[in-house]
Image: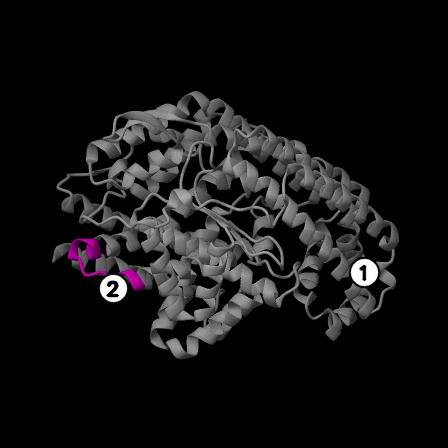
Amino acid sequence: MTSAEDVRWNLAELSPGADEARAEWADLVARATDFAGRCRGTVAGLDAGRLRALLDECDGLLERLSRLSVYGGSRVNMDAADVEANDLATFARERGAEIENQLLFVDLEWIALDDGPAEALLASPELAGYAHKLRTLREEKPYVLTEPEEQALNARTPAVASWSSLHDRQIATLEVPFDAGEGVRPHSVNLLLSHLYRPEREIRLGALTALYDGLAPRADVLAACYDALVGDRLGLDRVRGFADPMQPTNMQNELDAETVDAMIAATRESYGLGRRWFTTKARLLGLDTLELADQYAPVGEGRGFPWAEAVEIVDASFGSFSPRLAEVFRACLDAGHVDAAPRAGKASGAYCTTVSKGILPLVLLNYTGRFRDVVTLAHEFGHATHGALALERQTFRSHRGGLALAEVPSTFAQLLADDHLLAHESDPQTRLALVVDRLEQAMAAIFRQVVLARFEQRAYALRAEGRTLTPERMSEIWIEENAEYYGDAVSLPDGYRLGWSYIPHFIHVRFYTYAYAFAHLLALLLHGRYREDPEAFVPLYLELLATGGAASPAELVAPFGIDLAATDTWRAAFARFEVLLEEAEALAAA
């Protein structure tokens, strides 16, 4: 029977090898250069049909760019110490910047069109597959520079990306000696974090101490990476004229600042619900106060889940909702598009990336056999099914939405897995563990991610004042924001001051973190609608997936009766969260 260690990416569909990828990069640069030479300066004079042809040709180039970029990035994520992979990734970033520079004129010339001609084109049926993205693109008009200026800014990409690559390499190659009951052996960040879900308290406490002891010698480098990236982003904001460092992310998410601020404020006001659970959990564990290492301690002795069983659970939970979701899940597994087990040099965490219209998404995991890993598998395949269905229906440019909406299908998928697990698990201790885990997953996604977003807000504000983001300054902000959430309910160890240092979202996409909170609250509302009327819900939801980024979040959720601008929406979402809390409290008291 297949184990997680046997499940590794087969990247042959993306490229046969590094040499072939380099040759294809060169060909793609030539094709992009030819396209720009033929089409630059023509957008304003095109009718709808010819503009559609130009956009289709550009989309084809972007798909090839995506495939080659994903190949290079995936090679590094499989083994950060692979010299050939790192060389290829550097080469790919440089060629990618060249290609993006050649294609910049398409968006810039479209944005430069007067509103009247642009609206006439947008109304034409020929452009229906691109209309929403073209319309939202025009909202960037006040912040877009001339083509030479945009090209100059884009040319910085490889150098700026070196900071994120350095950060990733520091985390991926970190190995800390630790004894988790099997003798002292090297532990990655991911493996140490997995021990926080172990029942043995001494192992949890020791793993957390070992993690921060291992991070401490690298804190200066990790802080320098973040300081450089934040400084660059703020400088770019000044050049473009953005008023707030969150504005680019909000625009990408198609959310106004008021909606995001209201969601964050509602979450902070509800921190007490989290502390209420921590107090209950301390009592269940026989502790006066939780230590941070006890935060995810199992309540009940949840059994382990071998990889094969995890696959069966996700397949069944998807299939009971819609056979189409299960088809995509199995197709990705059969294609070798999953890399499952943790190992030295492999990227930490989990993610899914779409590739192109002809290639299924890739999923990276660090599967260790816990039931939480089963839910993570479902979460990432929520992304994969979303991407696959959207790519079937939409143009490549239009298949991907903003971050906040993108996290909704993944969160909804993990709720489906929770439903299946609870419906079929007979062991009472495992059922208790599952209910507690579902609650704590929601807490991590909602409350913790808002803590992270608040940390980012304050870090950017500090850097905007011209102050360097040193480890000490970031540690101070980090502890203050976490203390607001945990209060007196959880004791934070001294080492936790470095809790900011290994989080990849800070490095790769600013303010990604609030998307998790936004999406989890929204997914709780959708899950409630599904339970009320499954027959009516499923076709509407499949349509949401297939629409991808071709509509705004507000438009996508309107058929479900959800108004993102209404204060009552967030109140209703936290009412759904409180139901999860009450279910966990009731089972814990039984």
Pointer 2 residue = 424
The image shows residue 581 at horizontal and vertical percentages of 25, 57
Q: Which one is in front in this view, the residue at disc 2 or the one at disc 1?
A: 2
Q: Could you tell me which residue is drawn at 69 percent across and 51 percent down?
A: 64
- Residue 238 visible in this rendered orientation of the protein: no
Q: Earlier in the sequence, mark 2 or mark 1?
A: 1
The quadrant of the picture occupied by the C terminus is: bottom left
Answer left or right for 291 relative to 541: left
Does the magenta segment cover residue 402?
Answer: no
Pointer 1 residue = 113
- Residue 46 visible in this rendered orientation of the protein: yes
Residue sitting at the far front = 1
What's the amino acid at mark 1?
Leu
What's the amino acid at mark 2?
His
Does the magenta segment cover residue 430?
Answer: yes
In terms of depth relative to the viewer, which is nearer, 105 or 35?
A: 35
* Circle number at residue 423: none
The image shows residue 453 at horizontal and vertical percentages of 46, 44
Q: Could you tell me which residue is drawn at 18 percent across and 49 percent down?
A: 300
> Pointer 1: residues within 10 angstroms few (<14), some, or many (20+)?
some
Instruction: Answer with the quarter of the image where residue 185 lies.
Output: top left
The region drawn magenta spans: 420-432
The image shows residue 236 at horizontal and vertical percentages of 67, 39
Residue sitting at the far top = 217
